[in-house]
């Protein structure tokens, strides 16, 4: 056993086993070290203990000088009791079992025991604990308390009050973790119920988590309600690609159909939480609009064709004057194969995956996009969120920043022209006029320069900055002082490219970061955007130029890989003109969409959970997602389409599996050297920043 | 994972008012009292209870949704949190609007032994309302309460901040007569008394 400094540990005895545990650890946690278990309902390791359910009662005593143990006369709640020197804990005595039985009998008095029709039945902590520790029959013969069943708290969460055991996990979650405090206990005693203000809509970006942490079936998912029983479900480890955070999820499927998404623990990224987009946003797997076979346009209708015919058609039409626009959920393998196909097969370099208003050229891009890992954000002294609505675009980063503020006294500064969810806990709010983020960044740069007594020539005066941004000099100086105290992080997202003069803004922020030693992040937005950037997918013409070239007739063919320019591109008009004018359009995607109407060839794509693949999240962590469900039709993963097509154009040995492609990527891209399937770690492998300009 | 919802439609769900939609009713005096309260406590969260008393006075004795939302607005807490606190305590009237005077009959053990039930029956007959109801003219609300901690005066009634007991039919008649004649609402008076105590000067050590 490792030796630990004496001051930090205490000697305790659990069930006659001596051990050393860190001082102040809770009894429930200490007992886990031995592999023993204390049953719990209200305790949750990521929230503050409250001791509401009394399920964790244990016998506690203290060693006396003569060696005997003097027990406390009453049982103690293990979830609120920190260990102390000489503590003797018993979790398996007759008294403890009697207490647990008593607590469960009380909890079950008003519980409807409608397990056969409860969504939680089969994975319910109350059910499990009752079977292990509870009484076999109830002595209660009166009429149980009744409450309205299946009340819809929101579109996603259904409340069944009768089943509630008042543990307060959901209430504490909204207070401590998500921070919107939308749920509270109303009324008291037997009438106590967790619900929203006047039963209004439960309007939270993280409401789905309360369904998962509810230890009974009181909060259930409206979408999953009565869809399956837990023992009918098969579950696979999956990733959520709704945004670039790369949350780990469980994909629960029944009869090859995805029925629900639950959070999977990954301490480096999402801990165990999901946002509502991730939890409820995977409808497209079972959508009736899924594309199931390749289609070819004949006049004004589509006719089904075989893959071979589709390939032949594409090979005949695509050449040096073609381009590809990529969506955000294509795996690293797909992106790599696409690049190879266009370069080696068609002799074209026009690929882009960005859809923001400004598309910086290679020289203007930020050199480092993710200096802070997601997990490190909770330990920062200061976090400056600049021009980003984290709760919307990076929900898990938002939770981390809030966690730092809640637990570790991180000071959060929010600089934005809109209101964001982070405003509610920001220590300092720099709300500027719309479109003035660039001036704000320069103002901040000046404040930092003045604080460091360096040359401030060429900067706008604070008065001018206040005029353009409405942010006061004192606030800027305060932020500069905070950043200069060290251990700070500046967080931007790629959405800044939709603002005014993003290149100048980011340059100013980068200078601030360099001057203050703060870490600087410009997190990517889409599911695998970071992967696309790390692989250097964007070459040749950029998105705007490609669409303009199409509209002008300079390009003969355009390939849309899981992207619909009509909804993604800021200028719908340009997108329409381009799709109208381009002679040959390939649409490869999951669902029918508007852009498909312009296509000459339509190819069905597999959703991310339908094939093997790796994805790179915003902090450059490469994670693998294995196949969870089967494609409902004849779809193929993007990489397979690209490599099969390449063989037809340029005969050679095609890649047969995603693993092979990843090996190839690792061999050609030094950053991915550690990211082969053999080496990928459980929590994902961070990219290796090996060459200076790898962050192109 | 289906678009088919079993229960209601999400579009019909009532929505909590946004902060800029609130119709704020606190008087200048109430705002000054709130400012005073902030200096008594370490943070605004601690001001929820006294803040609710101010709201109870300002909103005529009944803490409806708007009153709770306004307290939450001033104290920068969530609506649900303030509502949870307000509905926990029985002296905040959160369930229904109350009349000008609230008569609370203790029916706990000592009072019951000394005849609280006949007293309650007499009040019900006389006012023509049951427990938890308000007379049609909106003057009296009758309530049954747990022990008022005045067993020496059983059976006891509470009206506003004063206790009346022991009561019999004759003294109840006189009490009702007096209350009818009284201009000011005892419910608001009581809230005001409590606010005064809470916002009064801090006792020096």
Image (spheres, rainbow, N blue to C red):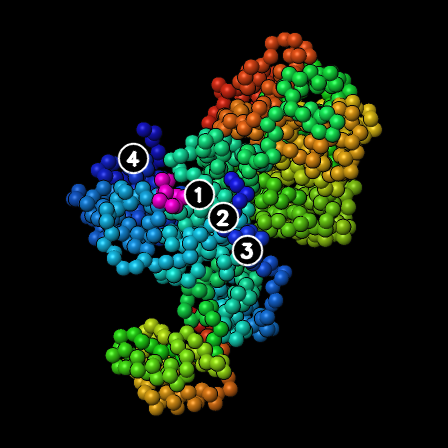
Q: Few, some or many C-alpha atoms within 10 Å of disc 3 (few <14, some 14-19, many ≥20)?
A: some
- According to the image, label 4 marks what residue? A34
Residue shown at 77% from the left, 43% from the top? A459
Disc 3/disc 4 C-alpha distance (Å): 48 Å
Q: Is residue A39 above or below residue A344?
A: below
Q: Which residue is mark 2?
A: B6
Q: What secondary structure prevails in the magenta region?
A: loop
Q: How far across and how far down the image is residue A210, in percent?
A: 46, 47
Q: Residues within 10 Å of mark 4 (few under 14, many from 20)?
A: few
| Residue under pointer 3 | B13
Q: CA distance from mark 2 to mark 4?
A: 45 Å
- How far apart, in angstroms, are the residues tagged by discs 2 and 3? 14 Å
Instruction: State which region is magenta.
Output: A116-124
Q: What numbered label is drawn on residue A226? A: 1
Classed neighbour count for the residue bearing mark 2: other residues with Cα under 10 Å, few (<14), some (14–19), many (≥20)? few
Chain identifier of the residue bearing label 3 in the image = B
Label 1: chain letter: A
Kindly check if marks 1 and 2 are in contact, taking CB atoms under 8 A apart as contact: yes
Instruction: Check disc 1: other Cα within 10 Å, few if <14, some if 14-19, many if 20+.
Output: few
Sequence order check, earlier mark of 2 and 3:
2
Along the horizontal axis of the image, is A347 left or right of A426?
right
Mark in front: 2 vs 3 = 2
Q: Quadrant of the N terminus of chain A?
A: top left
Q: Element at badge 4?
A: loop
């Amino acid at each position: 056993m490792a030796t630990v400094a004496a001051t930090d540990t205490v000697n305790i005895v659990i069930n006659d086993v001596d051990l050393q545990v860190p001082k102040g650890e809770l009894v429930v946690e200490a007992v886990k070290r031995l592999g023993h278990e204390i049953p719990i309902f209200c305790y949750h390791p990521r929230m503050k203990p409250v001791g509401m359910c009394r399920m964790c009662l244990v016998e506690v005593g203290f060693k006396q000088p003569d060696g005997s143990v003097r027990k406390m006369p009453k049982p103690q709640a293990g979830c609120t009791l920190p260990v102390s020197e000489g503590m003797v804990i018993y979790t398996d005595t007759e008294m403890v079992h009697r207490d647990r039985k008593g607590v469960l009998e009380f909890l079950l008095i008003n519980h409807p025991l409608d397990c056969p029709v409860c969504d939680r039945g089969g994975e319910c902590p109350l059910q499990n604990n009752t079977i292990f520790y509870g009484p076999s029959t109830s002595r209660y013969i009166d009429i149980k308390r009744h409450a309205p069943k299946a009340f819809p708290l929101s579109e996603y969460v259904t409340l069944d009050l009768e089943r509630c055991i008042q543990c307060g996990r959901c209430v504490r979650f909204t207070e401590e973790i998500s921070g919107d405090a939308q749920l509270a206990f109303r009324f008291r005693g037997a009438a106590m119920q967790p619900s929203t203000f006047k039963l209004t809509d439960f309007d939270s970006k993280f409401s789905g988590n309360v369904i998962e942490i509810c230890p009974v079936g009181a909060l259930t998912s409206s979408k999953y309600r009565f869809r399956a029983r837990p023992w009918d479900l098969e579950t696979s480890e999956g990733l959520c690609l709704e945004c670039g955070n790369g949350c780990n999820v469980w994909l629960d499927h029944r009869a090859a159909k995805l029925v629900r998404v639950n959070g999977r623990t990954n301490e480096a990224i999402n801990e165990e939480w999901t946002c509502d987009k991730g939890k409820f946003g995977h409808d497209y797997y079972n959508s009736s609009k899924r594309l199931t076979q390749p289609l070819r346009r004949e006049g004004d209708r589509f006719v089904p064709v075989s893959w071979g015919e589709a390939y032949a058609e594409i090979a005949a039409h695509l050449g040096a004057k073609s381009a590809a626009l990529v969506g955000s959920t294509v795996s690293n393998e797909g992106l790599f194969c696409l690049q190879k196909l266009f370069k080696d097969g068609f002799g074209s370099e026009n690929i882009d995956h960005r859809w923001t208003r400004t598309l910086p050229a290679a020289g203007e891009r930020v050199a480092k996009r993710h200096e802070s890992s997601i997990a490190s954000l909770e330990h920062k002294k200061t976090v400056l969120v600049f021009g980003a609505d984290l709760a919307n675009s990076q929900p898990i980063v938002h939770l981390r920043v809030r966690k730092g503020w809640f637990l570790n006294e991180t000071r959060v500064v929010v600089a934005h022209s809109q209101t964001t969810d982070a405003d509610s806990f920001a220590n300092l709010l720099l709300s500027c006029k719309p479109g003035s983020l660039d001036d704000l960044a320069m103002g901040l740069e000046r404040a930092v320069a003045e604080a460091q007594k360096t040359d401030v020539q060429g900067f706008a005066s604070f008065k001018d900055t206040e005029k353009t941004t409405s942010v006061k000099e004192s606030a800027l100086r305060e932020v500069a002082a905070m950043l200069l105290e060290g251990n700070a992080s500046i967080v931007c997202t790629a959405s800044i490219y939709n603002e005014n003069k993003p290149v100048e803004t980011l340059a100013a922020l980068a200078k601030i970061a360099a001057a203050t030693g703060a870490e600087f992040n410009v997190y990517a937005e889409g599911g695998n955007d970071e992967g696309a950037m790390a692989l250097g997918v964007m070459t040749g013409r950029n998105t705007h130029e490609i669409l303009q070239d199409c509209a002008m007739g300079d390009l003969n063919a355009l390939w849309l890989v899981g992207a619909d320019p009509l909804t993604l591109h800021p200028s719908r008009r340009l997108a329409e003109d381009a799709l109208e004018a381009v002679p040959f359009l390939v649409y490869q995607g999951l669902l029918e969409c508007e852009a498909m109407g312009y296509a000459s060839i339509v190819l069905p794509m597999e959703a991310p959970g339908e094939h093997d693949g790796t994805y790179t999240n915003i902090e450059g962590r490469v994670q693998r997602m294995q196949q969870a469900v089967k494609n409902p039709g004849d779809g193929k993963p993007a990489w397979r389409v690209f490599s099969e097509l390449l063989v037809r154009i340029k005969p050679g040995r095609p890649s047969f599996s995603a693993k092979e492609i990843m090996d190839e990527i690792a061999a050609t891209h030094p950053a991915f050297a550690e990211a082969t399937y053999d080496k990928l770690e459980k929590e994902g492998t961070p990219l290796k920043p090996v060459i200076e300009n790898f962050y192109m | 994972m289906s678009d088919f919802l079993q229960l209601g439609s999400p579009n019909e769900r009532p929505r909590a008012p946004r902060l800029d939609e609130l119709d704020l009713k606190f008087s200048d005096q109430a705002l000054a009292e709130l400012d005073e309260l902030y200096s008594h406590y370490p943070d605004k969260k601690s001001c929820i209870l006294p803040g609710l008393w101010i709201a109870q006075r300002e909103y005529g004795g009944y803490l409806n949704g708007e009153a709770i939302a306004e307290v939450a607005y001033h104290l920068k807490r969530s609506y649900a949190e303030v509502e949870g606190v307000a509905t926990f305590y029985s002296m905040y009237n959160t369930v229904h609007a109350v009349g000008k005077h609230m008569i609370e009959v203790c029916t706990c053990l000592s009072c019951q032994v000394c005849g609280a039930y006949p007293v309650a029956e007499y009040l019900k007959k006389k006012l023509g309302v049951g427990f938890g109801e308000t007379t049609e003219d909106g003057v009296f609300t009758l309530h049954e309460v747990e022990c008022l901690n005045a067993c020496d005066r059983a059976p006891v009634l509470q009206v506003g901040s004063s206790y009346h007991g022991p009561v019999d039919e004759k003294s109840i008649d006189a009490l009702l007569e007096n209350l009818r004649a009284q201009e000011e609402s005892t419910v608001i008076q009581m809230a005001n008394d409590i606010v005064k105590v809470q916002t009064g000067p801090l006792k020096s050590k």
